[in-house]
Amino acid sequence: MRNFVTGTTVVSLRYRDGVIMGADTKGSYGRLAKYTGLQRIFKMGDQTLIGVSGEISDMQYLKKALETLTEEDPRRIDAYGYYKMTQRIMYSARSRMSPLNLSVCVGGVDSVCTAEGLNNQKTLGCVDHLGNFYFSNVVCTGIGAHLVLPLLRSKVDGREDEITREEGISLVEEAMRILFYRDCGASNEIQVGYADAQDAHISDAYRIQTNWDIALREDEIVIE
């Protein structure tokens, strides 16, 4: 697999009414910040969010494939349906020895709980480039799985039916802030989406506030 333009971490978690997902809008060409304003979270169907990290061209291929399958299927597809559809696309590409260089978060609210282990009809899972998949209360892709996943698990696990939308968005913003501090491929311009029983919504891109005073030493000379 060769990378050209890539996007970094997607952060997602279950909350009281559904699923919240966040990602930045930066596209990197190697270590060059090549593009801004790239949307890496998109809505499928009525109540499903899909967030993608990895190669942007592969993300565009996956999005087009899902849209085509949706148009061809007369039935309503719920979040779990899109999750399994994504897994089959990723596994099929891997079986052709041409895997998509992506990690995909799929989250939403199902009208019917169709899979064992889903939490009150709230689907949240991850599919990697090999088609491997799992469900969890918190899903982070890329370097976020190392830097912010433990923090979010400590805040969410056991409380996923208590967390409000505002608290969930605040947790996602804090995770994205930590990633901006520590990941050179991350940006402080982010989008946050949520899916509940009524609809799925993705915000416009906005900048989170950061504070770099933590990086200063008292004896450090700063050239102004």
Image (cartoon, rainbow, N blue to C red):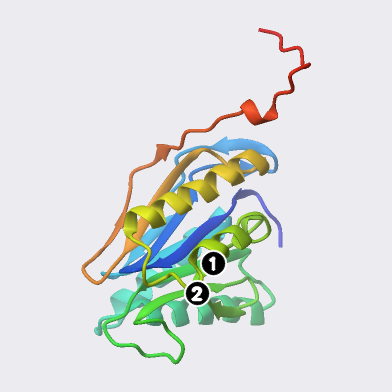
At 55% from the left and 54% from the top, the residue drawn is 56
At label 2, counting other C-alpha atoms closer than 10 Å, the crowd grade (few under 14, some 14-19, many 20 or more) is many
Instruction: Give the residue type at disc 2.
Output: Gly
Q: Position of residue 194 (x, y in %)?
A: 34, 60
Q: Is residue 125 left or right of residue 28?
A: left
Q: Which kind of residue does numbered mark 1 sit on?
A: Val
At mark 1, the secondary structure is strand
> Is label 2 in a helix, a strand or a loop?
strand
Residue 60: image location, x then y, percent:
48, 59
At a point 58% along the width and 79% down the height, the residue shown is 133
Distance between mark 2 and mark 1 Cα atoms: 7 Å
Specify the quadrant of the image occupied by residue 146: bottom right
- Determine which quarter of the picture holds residue 206: top left
Mark seen at residue 152: none
Task: Please give the residue where the numbered disc 2 appears in the rendered image.
Answer: 125
Q: Earlier in the sequence, mark 2 or mark 1?
A: 2
Position above or below: 108 against 190? below
Q: Position of residue 211 (x, y in %)?
A: 56, 30
Q: Residue furthest right?
A: 219
Tell me where residue 202 appears, x and y as whole percent.
33, 53
Q: Nearer the viewer, residue 25 or 166?
A: 166
Tell me if residue 40 can be seen.
no
Residue at point 65%, 82% (across, down):
95
The residue labelled by disc 1 is 139
Crowding at label 1, few (<14), some or many (≥20) Cα neighbours within 10 Å?
Answer: many
Marks 2,1: beta carbons within 8 A: yes
Between 157 and 116, the one nearer to me in the picture: 157
